[in-house]
Image (cartoon, rainbow, N blue to C red):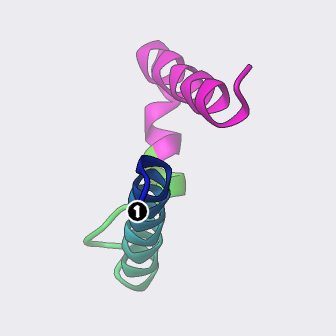
Amino acid sequence: MSSHDISLAIYGLIAIGGLTVELVALSRPQQVASLGRTLGRAMRTRTGRIGIVTGWVWLGLHFFGL
């Protein structure tokens, strides 16, 4: 198994974990915030907006090799 395969497996596990948390959030909205609510809350402040844009830039650089 190469390091590329391990990286893909880790990203897949992160995606499955995120999907699981989102499904739990949709079934129990009082206990767990959904991704949309979390991002909405973060977008209320300038620091949150900068953090979200920085995250998108990081993803773009790593996945698209810009």
Across and down, in percent, residue 63 comes to 65, 37
**What residue do we see at 44% from left, 39% from top?**
41
Up the image or down, 6 lies above or below 61; here it is below
| Magenta-colored segment: predominant secondary structure | helix
Stretch in magenta: 39-66
Please identify the residue farthest to the front as the structure is shown.
Answer: 1
Which quarter of the rendering shows the C terminus? top right
Residue placed furthest toward the left: 31
Residue drawn at x 48%, y 58% as measured from the top left = 5
Q: Residues within 10 Å of mark 1 (few under 14, many from 20)?
A: few
- Residue designated by label 1: 1
Magenta stretch encompasses residue 45? yes
Quadrant for the N terminus in the image: bottom left
Q: Is residue 44 left or right of residue 27?
A: right
Depth check: give the residue in front, 5 or 25: 5
Q: Please, what secondary structure does the residue beneath circle 1 have?
A: loop
- Quarter of the view holding residue 58: top right
Asked whether, in this view, residue 53 is left or right of residue 23, the answer is: right
Relative image position of residue 55 (x, y in whole percent): 52, 28
Q: Horizontally, is 65 left or right of 13 in the view?
A: right
Which residue is painted at 34% across and 81% down in the image?
28
Residue type, numbered disc 1:
Met
Indicate whether residue 61 is drawn in magenta.
yes
| Most foreground residue, 57 or 51 | 57
Please say if 36 is above or below 41. below
Q: Residue at x 41, y 85 (%)?
A: 27
